[in-house]
Image (spheres, rainbow, N blue to C red):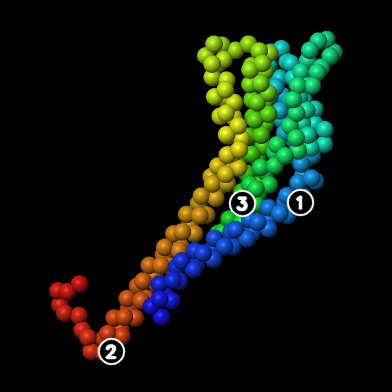
Amino acid sequence: MKREMRRKGPRTLTAHLGRFVLVFVVSLAVLAALWTVIAPTYTRLVGALSRPLFRLVESPNATVLSTQGAETWIYRIVGAHEIAPFTWFDRYTFFALIPLLALVAATPGLGWRRRIVRGMTGIGALLVVHVLYVVSSVELSYAAMGLRTVGPLAARTLDIWQIVVRVLWEAAPIVIWVALTFGAWRRLFARLRSGDSAGADARRSSWTGALGTLGWKKKEGTP
């Protein structure tokens, strides 16, 4: 009985983690299968928000962005009424949306309303990251190829900035998920610790009662 009570806490935590992994895997598989349907709409949204940002950071404007299905194509203006393809982003550039939503769906301790609100908030936050990624990566490529004039300090740090942009793009889903669900995880672990404390008190009371039945009494002044 003592061994069973001692293992109750870890089993409860294991159950939560096991459910989290299971729901995450299932959600990831379902959402990944739907990505071919989701990707074109999401790509158009990223393109629609990226175009005005390109116009804001470029003077004169040199970039033409076109979304073709789930792909984003970047053209550079090379003359009057003439453009040339510069680079493109494939259908999996924005795929991080899928694991982010799967992580939110699998997080324990969230009701459906909170889960939906956090999911929508996560989509909005990741959308901002993807827009900034498209614009910054293109502008950094221009600078690296000498197509955009930058200061000497910026020229020396271009490689560093390209690495920073890449790392932020890849880490964004995890960072956003942690920020959105930190409170839920904290409440879960607090509840588990509270349960362990209650279990310890119950075990202590049961042992005291058993020893009292056997005629043992605690001496005054002893802990």
Q: CA distance from mark 3 to mark 2?
A: 52 Å
How crowded pointer 1 is (Cα within 10 Å; few <14, some 14-19, many 20+) is rated as few
Q: Nearer the viewer, mark 2 or mark 1?
A: 1
Q: Which mark is residue 8?
A: none
Q: Find the residue positioned furthest to the left.
A: 221
> At 60% from the left edge and 58% from the top edge, which residue is drawn?
21
Closest to the observer: 155 or 98?
155
In the image, residue 64 sits, relative to residue 165, either above or below, namely above
> At 64% from the left edge and 39% from the top edge, which residue is drawn?
126
Q: Find the residue positioned furthest to the bottom.
A: 214
**In the rendered view of the protein, which quadrant contains the C terminus?**
bottom left
Q: Which mark is residue 213?
A: 2
In the image, residue 23 sits, relative to residue 32, either above or below, namely below
Q: Amino acid at mark 1?
A: Ala
Residue 48 appears in the rendering: no
Left or right of 37: which side holds 186?
left
Q: Which mark is residue 103?
A: 3
Residue 167 falls in image quadrant? top right
Q: CA distance from mark 1 to mark 3?
A: 16 Å
Q: Secondary structure at mark 3?
A: helix
Q: Amino acid at mark 3?
A: Leu
Q: Which residue is mark 1?
A: 33
**Sequence order check, earlier mark of 1 and 3:** 1
Left or right of 92: which side holds 18?
left
Q: Position of residue 124 (x, y in %)?
A: 65, 40
Residue 190 appears in the rendering: yes
Closest to the observer: 121 or 62?
62
